[in-house]
Image (cartoon, rainbow, N blue to C red):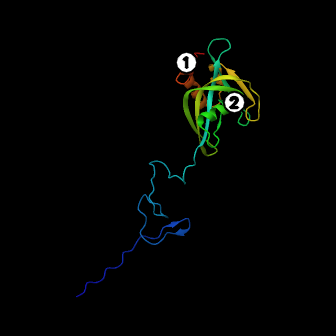
Amino acid sequence: MTAPEPEPAQGPEPVLVQGQESPPGPAPAQGQDPVSGRDQDPVPGQAPAQGPEPEPVLAAGCVLWRPSPTGHGIEVALVHRPKWDDWSHPKGKRKRGETAEACALREVLEETGHHCELGGGLPTVRYVVAGRPKEVAYWAARALDGAFVPGREVDRLCWLVPAAARTRLTHPRDRELLDALLAGTAAPGGQPHDAS
């Protein structure tokens, strides 16, 4: 006597995704995309990413300082950007092929009218602007020669003792950079140690 043929296995019901039926075949395993069947790498407690993360906008700038004309302590340069109505350190986007150091020197000259000497690196700042990540490399920089000329991007420049600069800065991230400068970890010759 011949054994009866087994009945074909019944798979799960088709899955509807965005109004389309999934292709026939086994349902995707947990952790797989229901349409493509490709593995997903979810982060616990976080929704899966929607496509690749955009490349960050690369920029560079300086916390620009000079010895105080009084002979006691230092002054820090702050720039006012009318587009954002904020006070910050000079900075800007890197040009194609430009190093971060070259960008920092160029931006200080463009925004303040001063040449400068780069000191040690300060913390890199990361934040999001208009949904895109931005990464700004910073240096301590001693101001050399030059003169400020107001422009479209920067309409005012002020030199302030650190305590006044801290109050005037608009963004907390810029205050943290000032604190790093004053901690003396990045300044040539240790000059920025200022207790004002």
SS of the residue at dot 1?
Answer: helix
Q: Locate residue 153, reporting x and y percent.
A: 73, 35
| Residue 65, percent from left and from top | 63, 22
* Residue 114 location, quadrant: top right
Q: Which residue is drawn at 43% across and 64% down?
A: 28
Which mark is drawn over residue 109? 2
The secondary element bearing badge 2 is classed as helix
How packed is label 1: few (under 14 Cα within 10 Å), some, or many (20 or more)?
few
11 lies above or below 188: below
Seen from the viewer's position, the closer of residues 190 and 153 is 190
In contact (CB < 8 Å): disc 2 and disc 1: no
- Residue at screen point 77% across, 33% down: 151
Tell me which amino acid carries mark 1.
Gly
Residue 163 image label: none
Disc 2/disc 1 C-alpha distance (Å): 23 Å
**Which circle marks residue 190 in the picture?**
1
Residue 75 horizontal/vertical position (percent): 65, 19
The residue most toward the left is 1
Q: In which quarter of the image is residue 101?
A: top right
Q: Residue furthest bottom?
A: 1
Q: In the shown orientation, is residue 139 left or right of residue 157?
A: left
Looking at numbered disc 2 in the image, what kind of residue is underneath it? Leu
- The N terminus lies in quadrant: bottom left
Q: Nearer the viewer, residue 56 or 113?
A: 113
Q: Tell me which residue sits at (47%, 60%) in the image.
A: 33
What residue occupies the far top of the structure in this picture?
A: 71
Measured as percent of width and height from the top left, residue 19 is found at: 56, 67
Q: In this view, does 193 lie to the left or right of 13?
A: right
In the image: residue 36, left or right of residue 147: left
Quadrant including the C terminus: top right
Query: How many residues crowd mark 2 within 10 Å: few (<14), some (14–19), many (20+)?
Result: some
